[in-house]
Image (spheres, rainbow, N blue to C red):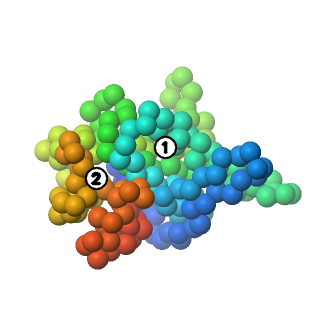
Amino acid sequence: MNGIFEDAGAPRVTSVQLLNPYIDKDALTDKMSVLDIVARTDQAILIDIEIQIRNTGEMRERSLYYWAKLYEGQLHESDTYHTLRPTIAINVLDFVEIPNDRVHNVFQLRNQDGALFTDHLTLHFLEVPKFAQAMLHEQTALIRWLAFLNVIAAHSPSQAKPGGGQVAGGREGRPIFSSVGASFSQITLRI
């Protein structure tokens, strides 16, 4: 994760605790949500890490929805709003979602002059198809981590996707990671 935070100019994380990825329904009619990885940092910041291979056309809304569920889930009866902690969504995508050349896009809530409203909302989008171009120009921790993912995907021909997909992830991609002897969570937390 520190490669992502370093690239965004955010402080490093020294430890994380993995949490239950299931978000319970509040009512029978609510949508059941299962996140890929949920973690809490040593500063009590909540992080949702999602890895998406297929573009279903709803990634932005999905990311906001998961972020909102994690954020609101922090409050319990009689808690004050001051107990809320920043919540971060990290989306690793095997498709282009943001129409620019950046591998890593960071979104926060700001006013028209660019002043940060709150640090409680941060959405990261890492787009692997843009990786090859970035690798020619940069050698950051984030680029090294994306290169690591590409090597793992390249050594798992049984999981290769048509069209040259480069990232393994989500529930569909987990066998790639276990085929090299490491768990999905351990590898993803190297971000």
How far across and how far down the image is residue 41, in percent?
53, 65
Name the residue nearer the viewer: 187 or 8.
Answer: 187
Q: CA distance from mark 2 to mark 1?
A: 19 Å
Q: Residues within 10 Å of mark 2 (few under 14, many from 20)?
A: many
How far across and how far down the image is residue 109, in percent?
56, 35
Please tell me whether residue 90 is drawn above or below residue 45 in the rendered image: above
Helix, strand or loop at label 1? It is: strand
Residue type for callout 1: Leu
Write the residue at 22% across / 54% down.
160
Q: Quadrant of residue 137?
A: top left
How far across and how far down the image is residue 115, in percent?
54, 32
Please tell me whether residue 43 is drawn above or below residue 103 in the rendered image: below
Write the residue at 31% across / 29% down.
100
Quarter of the figure with the C terminus: bottom left
Among all residues in the image, which is located at the extreme left? 136
Among all residues in the image, which is located at the extreme top? 112
Name the residue nearer the viewer: 188 or 12.
Answer: 188
How far across and how far down the image is residue 183, in percent?
37, 72
Q: Is residue 28 left or right of residue 33?
A: right
Residue type for callout 2: Val
Quarter of the figure with the N terminus: bottom left
**Residue 9 in sight here:** no
Whichever of labels 2 and 1 marks the residue nearer the N terminus, that label is 1
Among all residues in the image, which is located at the extreme bottom? 181
Q: Which residue is mark 2?
A: 167
Q: Which residue is mark 1?
A: 123
Write the residue at 37% across / 53% down.
4
